[in-house]
Image: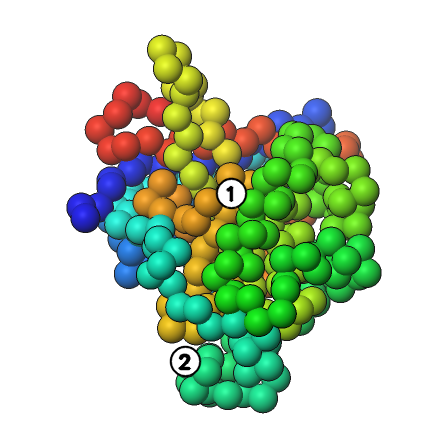
Amino acid sequence: MSARSYDLVHRTTYEYAQPVTDSYGRTTMTPRDLPDQRVVATSLTIDPEPADTGRHVDWFGNTTTYFGVTRAHTRLVVTSRSTLEVSRVAPPRDALPDVGWRAVARSVTTADLGVLRTDAAGVVELREAVLPSAHVRFVDEVRDWAAPSFTEERPLADVVVDLVHRIRTELTYRSGSTTVHTTQAQLLAQGAGVCQDFAHLMIAALRVHGVPARYASGYIETRPRPGRPKLRGADASHAWVSVWLPGHGWLDADPTNDQLVDDRYVVLGWGRDYHDVPPLRGVIFTEGGGATPRVEVDLVPSGSEPFV
């Protein structure tokens, strides 16, 4: 299968009512180089030009960039541009191993390398991926909601397929219905959220049953309705889930869209939850208040019309 080539632009703009004397930020806006995702070119620009920048690879292998703007400004623009080739294929169910979820959970506890199909360093990573984290908590509401998916000795691959389907059908996608601080219990109570919430819920459901899962951050190519043009800047960052499936590796699944991840997705990075991989976070020094960012994202096939 040939790779799909994409041009990606992610621009975040802050406009302040009062001058900001200093802005310090950290971005995770550089896509990862992976066996099924090749970064052909990438750049990050910050306006105003920072007095200081630094690039760092974090614990999870994500590329982060730190910057400090130390002259007065009323507007801050951070723009990432990349060209990528993606060859990722969503595996059919009959190509996935039938290892049971209980066997996986038990093997993480006992560090059974034979069942987990990994090495000692991999066990450390997997044990971290079954712990609660800043945005993933083990509560009765999640345990009770998830229980029907975790029937006795069910293959883990079937658990994953069932969870993404249940989240897609039982919950409603509603932009603006939650915040970064919304808990899984609150999400289940109100029945609506966004991709970040759905990813956190699925991760919590897996981890509370002892199955390693991590949060993936990136983008998905969107297509306009037939006969309608693709709107510039109308794409958005996206979130999904990676589950450790022995004999396959990390299996990526998107509960927002009820599907496994394929070549329409671009991976920025991963971590325990959103807290580890926000596209942009930072602090400002000003006499005025903060500002709500304006985010514009375009993920288009290479050679398409100019974008943001």
| Sequence-first tag of 1 and 2 | 2
Q: Position of residue 145 (x, y in %)?
A: 73, 53
- In the picture shown, does residue 37 fall above or below 271? above
Q: Residue at x 46, y 80 (%)?
A: 116
The answer to whether residue 145 shows anywhere in this view is yes
> In this rendering, is residue 127 above or below 52?
below
- Residue 52 image position (x, y, % from top left): 49, 53
The furthest residue to the top = 227
How far separated are the C-alphas under marks 1 and 2?
27 Å
Q: Residue tagged by mark 1?
A: 258
Above-or-below relation of 230 to 172:
above
Quarter of the image where the C terminus is located: top left
Amino acid type, label 1: Asp
In this orientation, does residue 45 appear? no
Callout 2: SS: loop
Q: Nearer the viewer, residue 138 or 56?
A: 138
Question: Nearest the camera: 301 or 11?
Answer: 301
Marker disc for residue 71: none
Q: Which residue is mark 2?
A: 117
Q: Amino acid at mark 2?
A: Arg
Q: Residues within 10 Å of mark 1 (few under 14, many from 20)?
A: some
**In screen coordinates, is 177 left or right of 228?**
right
- Of helix, strand and loop, which one carries label 1? loop
Residue 235 locus on image (x, y percent): 46, 30
Residues packed near mark 2 inside 10 Å, few (<14), some (14 to 19) or many (20 plus): some
Q: Nearer the viewer, residue 146 or 261?
A: 146
Q: Position of residue 133 (x, y in %)?
A: 69, 64
204 vs 28, left or right, is: right
Q: Is residue 100 above or below residue 48?
A: below
Instruction: Identify the residue shown where x is 67% and y is 39%.
Output: 170
Seen at 18% across and 46% down, the residue is: 2
